[in-house]
Amino acid sequence: MTIVTLAGYMAAVLTTVCWAPQAWKTIRTGDTRAISLISQALYAAGLSMWAIYGAAIASLPLLAANVASLIPVLIILVIKARNHRADERALAQV
């Protein structure tokens, strides 16, 4: 394994692990008030594009990092979207 490949795998681990605490807190509390729906959606789209690119150039570290990072980001995005709809319904009833 080359140093470049090792660096790619380390980047994959670090960028994936950094989202675990946020995903866990969001799942546990359901609190998404401080999270931007648009920002989270754009980030998920960007990760998806990077994963497609990684697959296209056959870069396992790039593909793995982005697919693994996409999972907690999508979890947060789904919870945020649900909360956003609930907030909009509550405001409409006021």
Image: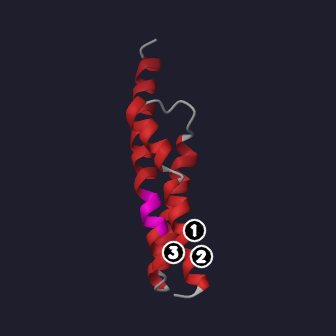
Asked which quadrant contains residue 81, the reply is top left
What residue is shown with label 2? 7
Spot occupied by residue 11 in the image (x, y as percentages of width and height): 57, 68
Q: Image height check: is 17 above or below 12?
A: above
Whole-number angstrom distance, CA of label 1 to CA of label 3: 9 Å
Spot occupied by residue 72 in the image (x, y as percentages of width and height): 43, 51
Q: Image height check: is 23 above or below 71?
A: above
Whether tag 2 and tag 3 are in contact, CB under 8 A, the answer is no
Whole-number angstrom distance, CA of label 1 to CA of label 2: 6 Å
Q: Tag 3 or tag 2, which sits nearer the N-term?
A: 2
Whole-number angstrom distance, CA of label 2 to CA of label 3: 11 Å
Which secondary structure, mark 3? Answer: helix
Query: In the image, is 74 to the left or to the right of 8?
Result: left
Q: Image height check: is 22 above or below 71?
A: above
Q: Amino acid at mark 3?
A: Leu
Range of residues picked out in magenta? 65-70
Whether tag 1 and tag 2 are in contact, CB under 8 A, the answer is yes
Which secondary structure, mark 2? Answer: helix
Query: In the image, is 74 to the left or to the right of 9?
Result: left
Query: In the image, is 78 to the left or to the right of 57?
Result: left
Q: Which mark is residue 62?
A: 3
